[in-house]
Image (cartoon, rainbow, N blue to C red):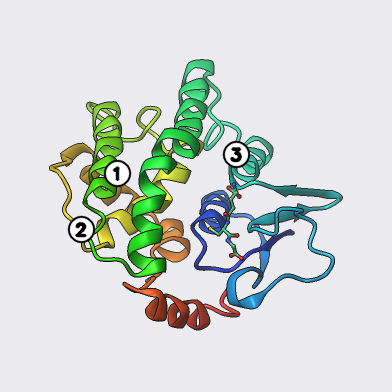
Amino acid sequence: MIEVLGRRNSANVQKVMWAIGELGLEYTRHDVGGSFGYPDDYPNPNQVVPTIKDGDLTVWESGACVRYLAHEYGQGSLWPDDRNTRAIADQWMEWHRSDFSNAYFPTFMNLVRVGLSATDLADSIEKCAAAYQQLETQLAGQDFIAGNTLTMGDIPTGTVTYRYFEMTIDRPSLPNVEAWYQRLCDRPAFRYHVMIPFGTNPEEWAAEEKKNADIQ
Ligand SMILES: N[C@@H](CCC(=O)N[C@@H](CS)C(=O)NCC(=O)O)C(=O)O
């Protein structure tokens, strides 16, 4: 039984939950972080979510959690057997946490969590679009980020792509990304753990966070 410490509306928690859902693992999720606060014995010194526990192991950092789950429980699926596919999946996970996140998070945070207008964020939205153009190129001629099946490489960027397409912002034409996103939307685990409404401003965000309390 895997324990997940992290609120349901956190994108970093959703990465882990989606991986757990894809792998069909038993889990218990606890509301931690954001308006729920942190227990005194919370094991992540950075006071951020997620943290997972599996037996005697505690892991934090969402990418490390996804890799651990993929390696431990997803050999041949989320953790590809093929060396090349695995390296490319890993490469795009690293891209997600560096170049992509630097471009994407300012847009999401400032628009939804701070409540600035899309007009004020034009530069940031453009940088975000440029990051998605890189993914557009990678997805040409293949169904998923590292080939024709879902791998750990799809998890981090797939998670925030729900939000990218839900935000009221201008987006470039991204036919490959859109087709990939539709494939993700066909997956029950993605729909349940990732496609969670998040509102359009801080007040709506807070209300959505409350609505998700106690939902597994
Ligand atoms: N690098 C960390 C970042 C974690 C992170 O910043 N999580 C956000 C939620 S998405 C958080 O914990 N924010 C503060 C809070 O919810 O209390 C990871 O990938 O796990």
**Tag 2 or tag 1, which sits nearer the N-term?**
1
In this view, the residue farthest toward the left is 173
Pointer 1 residue? 128
At 63% from the left and 55% from the top, the residue drawn is: 25
- Mark 3 is on which residue type? Gly
Q: Quadrant of residue 71?
A: top right
Q: Can residue 12 be seen here?
A: yes
Q: Nearer the viewer, mark 3 or mark 2?
A: 2
Pointer 3 residue? 74
Describe the element under mark 3 as helix, strand or loop. loop
Q: Is residue 179 placed above or below 49 in the rendered structure?
A: above
Q: Quadrant of the N terminus?
A: bottom right
Q: Can residue 186 be seen here?
A: no
Residue 15 x %, y %: 52, 52
At 21% from the left and 37% from the top, the residue drawn is: 176
Residue 123 x %, y %: 24, 46
**Disc 1 and disc 2 in contact, CB within 8 angstroms:** yes
In this view, the residue farthest toward the top is 84
Q: Give the number of the disc on residue 45.
A: none
Pointer 2 residue? 169
At 42% from the left and 41% from the top, the residue drawn is: 102
Q: Nearer the viewer, mark 3 or mark 1?
A: 1
Q: CA distance from mark 1 to mark 2?
A: 11 Å
